[in-house]
Image: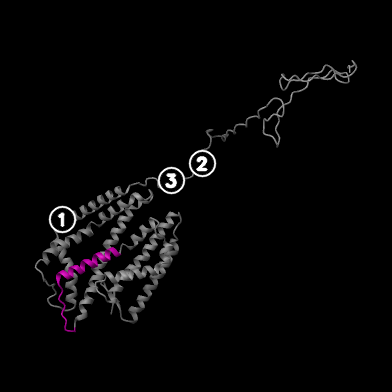
Amino acid sequence: MPISEDSPEVPEASDPGASPGSTHAPSDTPNGNSGEAETPHVGYSDEWSQPGTPVSGTVITPPAPPPPPVPVAKSGGTGSPPKPPDPPDEPGDEEEGMARMSFLEHLEELRKRILLALGGVGIAFFGSLIFSNQLWSVVEQPAVTALRNLHVNPPTLKLISPMDTFQIIWMKLPILCAIFIASPWILYQVWAFIAPGLYKRERRLAAPFVISSAGLFILGGMFAYFVAFRYGLEFLMGLGIGQGIDPAVNVNEYYDLFVDVMLGVGVIFEIPVLLFLLTLIRVVSPAFLVRHSRYAILGIVTLAAIITPTGDVFNLALFATPMIILFYLGIFASYILVLRREKRRFPWGTFIRWTLIVLVSLLVIGFFVARYYGYHPVLRWPIFIR
């Protein structure tokens, strides 16, 4: 059918080879007015489509985000931006400085520390050998005092084997003295062996460890010499007096008993240091020690029964009581360590207040005992006598 001139002009079909956004603009509109060119389709963005996705037509890339604002310095300042906060500590920072050694390296380190400890004992031995006679006078003093108090004449020790004097005075006694003299050096080697497995902040406890452990070992030896050995020896030798038994002490057996008591009590006084080290390496905790204290007391009494030179109850209590006190002292030291590790403060006010209350109570009890039962204090063991 022919198209009339008055009918509106039908747009021609778009050329397949033309560009996607091109169209043919008509010359006249249906009402006879001249029309404008059609606007090409552009990309848009909504909640169903991604930004920049074209529906039809050209693609318009979304604008880039604006740059962060530059901090403005306050009036009178230098104009530099504020310092960023420090990054949090990483878990690996705590292990800074920890040494990593193989099993053979551990054995080599152990061998080195043992040789150094033995070298220190050897030097102290040759120094003690010069004063062997003076040292023997100190060792025999408890026996002479006990025999004199028991009215045994002459108050001397008995020699059974001819070699006993040489072995004791010139060999065994200097070794015992060298162990006590070189104890700080020996304990330092112990710390140097375990220090590579500790954190960097925990290695700073080297000086307190050596001083406290060596001090407790020497304090234990002094307690054994002035209290436990003297009083226990006089008590034991006096049991046979009046029953037809005269004390006659062999010098070899006396020295063996002396060494057992001195070293045994010295090692016992290391209980606080041992508990502190176990807490330091996180093997035990103060709560665990308090919760299982009854088992610890049972073990202490059993250990005291083993190292006690005799089997009587008196000497057992004489050895077990200081061990129990030292056990609770070690718990206290471990509690202080845990508070420092958790960055908490110890309630010193409450502790000092209760300590004063206990001391005042003991003084009041001692006053009434001295007043109504005729006891008075003396500068020797036992402290109160009638």
Q: Residue at x 29, y 73 (%)?
A: 316
Residue for badge 1: 126
Q: Quadrant of the C terminus?
A: bottom left
Instruction: Please name the predominant secondary structure of the magenta segment in the image.
Output: helix
Q: Amino acid at mark 1?
A: Phe
Q: Amino acid at mark 3?
A: Gly
In the image, the segment drawn in magenta is 242-268
Q: Amino acid at mark 2?
A: Pro
Residue for badge 2: 85
Which of marks 2 and 3 precedes in the sequence? Answer: 2
**Separation of disc 2 and disc 1 at Cα?**
61 Å
Q: Quadrant of the N terminus?
A: top right
Residue 228 is one of the magenta-drawn residues:
no
Q: Secondary structure at mark 3?
A: helix
Which residue is farthest front? 1
Quick check: 73 left or right of 275? Answer: right
Image coords of residue 256 (percent x, y):
19, 68
Residue for badge 3: 92
Mark 2 Cα shell of 10 Å, populated few (<14), some (14-19), many (≥20): few
Q: Secondary structure at mark 2?
A: loop
Q: Assess whether mark 2 and mark 3 are in contact (beta carbons under 8 angstroms).
A: no
Image coords of residue 160 (percent x, y):
11, 71
Which of marks 1 and 2 precedes in the sequence? Answer: 2
Residue 252 is one of the magenta-drawn residues:
yes
Quick check: 54 left or right of 227? Answer: right
Q: Residue at x 10, y 66 (%)?
A: 163
Q: Residue at x 22, y 51 (%)?
A: 115
Depth check, mark 1 against mark 3: the one in front is 3
Task: Report the front residue among 286 and 296.
Answer: 296
Task: Report the front residue among 50 and 200.
Answer: 50
